[in-house]
């Protein structure tokens, strides 16, 4: 009862309500496209783009921008396009390109923050950016509106182009043979993932973003087999874990990002065991 009373007390604050709304929207978007990324073996792109977003955030901090979202979003989207093009056509293969861009972005970002530091606590700022912070609990109404608009765009893209995304995910060659512009839809997926990465930075930090993309998809695949059922389960899994992680973090005072990822890990273990049990009964 004491925990419920404490939770009810915190839920009366507007900043907690904003955090929950943003967390649910971000986790929902990341889970939908996470299934596609895992099946296409593109999950490493999310990790690389998260490092790029860190570099863009460092540049925004050096430029003293009050609203850094447009710059971070632009840089991350451009990097997503470059990564996709590099992996398809250039001599540098996709995994090597991701490693070069992600490591380079991290190094340049940290270097810029050192050279042009505007804070007395540089280590704290870097750690906050990489692993998440309580910034999700300091969102303003305008931040939630931007998050909501971008989330609606991501959801609309997934729903409208569901059949095309499905065909490109499972058999790209067949999709091309039937007239589907696979490269165009791969580009669309990369751009949407870049948007999701930027949205998720405030929730879990740039180094933990991949967890929001990978864990829900992999967990759902332990139990379900069809694309639709995996996608639906992944979305429910992601929203539930993000909500639980946020509430636990608020009640116990633990870091938001790390708490959400810890809940994801525990839930993945449950789904893994459920999958083993289901196969043993089959």
Image: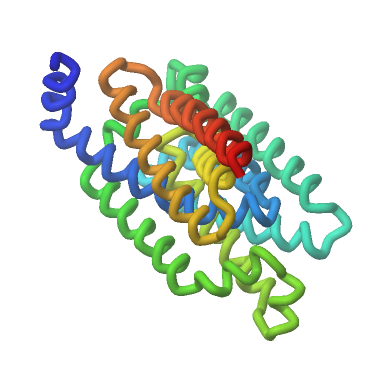
What count of labels does the image hold? 0
The image quadrant that residue 140 belongs to is: top left
User: Which quarter of the figure is the C terminus placed in?
Assistant: top right
Residue 252 picture location, percent across and down: 30, 16
Residue sitting nearer the eye, 44 or 82: 44
User: Which quarter of the figure is the N terminus placed in?
Assistant: top left
Residue 279 visible in image: yes
**236, above or below 261, in the image:** below
Residue sitting nearer the eye, 194 or 59: 194
Q: Is residue 147 left or right of residue 89?
A: left
**274, above or below 177, in the image:** above
Q: Looking at the image, which residue sits at the far front?
A: 281
The image quadrant that residue 86 belongs to is: bottom right
**115, above or below 175, in the image:** above
The residue drawn where x is 69% and y is 84% is 178
Q: Is residue 69 left or right of residue 216?
A: left
The residue drawn where x is 24% and y is 49% is 142
Residue 71 visible in image: no
Residue 124 picture location, percent across and down: 46, 18
The residue drawn where x is 28% and y is 37% is 19
What's the image's color scheme?
rainbow
Residue sitting nearer the eye, 229 or 52: 229
Q: Looking at the image, which residue sits at the far bottom?
A: 179
């Amino acid at each position: 009862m004491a925990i419920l009373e404490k939770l009810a007390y915190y839920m009366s604050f507007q900043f907690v309500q904003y955090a929950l709304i943003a967390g649910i929207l971000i986790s929902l978007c990341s889970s939908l496209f996470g299934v596609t990324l895992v099946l296409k073996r593109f999950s490493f792109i999310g990790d690389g783009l998260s490092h790029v977003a860190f570099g863009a955030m460092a540049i925004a901090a050096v430029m003293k921008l009050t609203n850094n979202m447009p710059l971070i979003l632009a840089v991350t989207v451009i990097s997503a396009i470059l990564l996709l093009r590099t992996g398809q056509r250039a001599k540098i293969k996709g995994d090597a390109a991701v490693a070069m861009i992600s490591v380079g972005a991290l190094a340049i970002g940290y270097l810029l923050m050192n050279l042009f530091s505007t804070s007395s606590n540089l280590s704290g700022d870097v750690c906050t950016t990489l692993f998440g912070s309580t910034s999700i609990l300091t969102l303003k109404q305008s931040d939630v509106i931007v998050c909501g608009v971008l989330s609606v765009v991501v959801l609309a893209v997934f729903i409208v182009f569901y059949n095309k995304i499905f065909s490109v995910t499972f058999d790209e060659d067949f999709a091309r043979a039937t007239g589907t512009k696979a490269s165009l839809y791969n580009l669309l997926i990369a751009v949407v993932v870049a948007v999701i990465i930027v949205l998720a930075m405030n929730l879990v930090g740039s180094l933990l973003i991949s967890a929001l993309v990978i864990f829900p998809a992999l967990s759902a695949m332990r139990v379900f087999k069809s694309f639709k059922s995996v996608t639906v389960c992944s979305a429910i899994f992601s929203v539930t874990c993000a909500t639980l992680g946020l509430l636990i973090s608020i009640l116990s005072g633990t870091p938001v990002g790390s708490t959400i990822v810890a809940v994801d890990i525990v839930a993945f273990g449950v789904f893994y065991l459920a999958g083993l049990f289901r196969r043993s009964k089959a």
